[in-house]
Amino acid sequence: MRNRKQLNSNTTVVQTTSFIEKHVANLSVFVVILGAICAFGLPYVLPLTYYFGITAPNEIGDAFGGIANPVIGFIGVCLTFLAFYIQYKSNERQNYELEVQKKENAYRFIRESIRDLKDDIKALRYTKERVVFHYSEAIWHFMLDNMLENEAEKDNNKIVMNPLFYQIAYILTLFEPIISDIDHADLEKKEKYQLIVNLEGLFEASFEFVLKVQQQMIKEGKEKSIKEFVRHKVIIPSKKIKIEMQEVLDRYKESEKEQFAKALTKIKGAAYVKSHRCTSGKATVQFFADFAEYKTQNPATSLTEAQYNDYFSKDDNISKILLNESIRLLVKLEFLDKVTFQLPFDGKTYNMAISRKTAEEYFDLDLVELNIDKDLWRDEFVGKYVYNQKERLRFMNTFVKIN
């Protein structure tokens, strides 16, 4: 998506081009009118120029032709130049519009590719003991069942491969071309970064389980027990994709402070944030103490004190902000380990702090999965906790201290 600064720049280019073309057309009309006046006015003007001794009709005709022809020729050259200039500007604008359309198409194609890949992963199913597992759970249980050598299979020199293995191996092959498409696309740096982040979240949420199982087996000294076909078809490609994705991401990555500042503008109550800080994976968000302080920093605001107070006192907005927006930041920004909110209102200060690990244990949810699965975010988090007054109260009692 084009950032606002780039859009404004592009709009200025188009407006400038239109302005020039408009005045070139006016200039062309002016030149034609001036030329006509000069050419056809000469027969009336020349007889009055007794200084040059031009009085006879033949002399006037010669003078008219001698002066008018160069004038008309010069006018013709000017009009030809103006015509070519208008055509040049028109072609320039057309090429610009084609480039914009080309970029939009490239961005749309990559977004659709990521969405299709996400749908493929979400459609994974694995049945074990008559229980059907979905998505990351399917990958997890599949890997647990297929990473270790089965003695019966070893004795019979026979390997029975689950269909899910082929699905995972196939999906892995889809990541690399999308990474390449993003890296070579004619897009803005921030657009590439956002696309890679989305793709990385999708990859991590799905195939991090594979790497975790392998790491655990290495710790237990069972690395040789990993089946060779799983090692070469799943684990090695996973590591390769992880390295490649990180290399591309590093080229377009924004600083953590920039990412945090951008994410903060999208939270509920962002307009009432006085200051924020983000260092070493720890973020602090400080809201205005009261309307007077808000008014001091926003003197041009049309907001009234009644509206300001109503915002925080209405519909349990304070508890919703502390619960929903703190988790939103942890979900959107994987580098964050802890978030702290300080929200003063009506003589009280609500202090809330929660870490990534604590949040995952408390809600029993994978924050990475919440980032890429909107249905999971809406149903398992927002619906179950944010819009549940009892759960909000439990969260406030657990994580919020009021001074």
Image: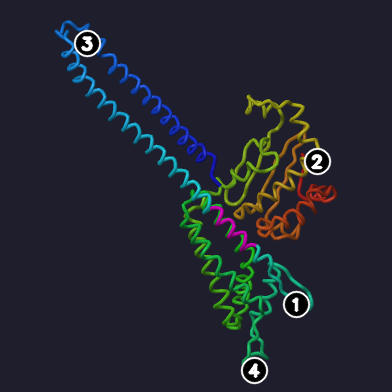
Q: Is residue 32 left or right of residue 17?
A: left
Q: Magenta span: helix, strand or loop, mainly? A: helix
Q: Residue furthest left?
A: 53
Q: State the SS at label 4.
A: helix
Location of the C terminus by quadrant is top right
Depth-wise, is mark 3 or mark 2 nearer the camera?
A: 3
Q: Amino acid at mark 3?
A: Leu
Q: What residue is disc 3 on?
A: 46
Q: CA distance from mark 4 to mark 3?
A: 116 Å
Q: What residue is disc 2 on?
A: 316
Residue 227: image quadrant is bottom right
Depth-wise, is mark 3 or mark 1 nearer the camera?
A: 3
Q: CA distance from mark 2 to mark 4?
A: 65 Å
| Residue found at x 73% / y 48% | 324
Image coords of residue 186 (percent x, y) = 46, 52
Find the magenta span and give its range.
107-118
Q: Amino acid at mark 2?
A: Asp
Question: Between disc 2 and disc 1, whose residue precedes?
Answer: 1
- Vertical placement of residue 73 versus 168, above or below: above
Residue 66: image quadrant is top left
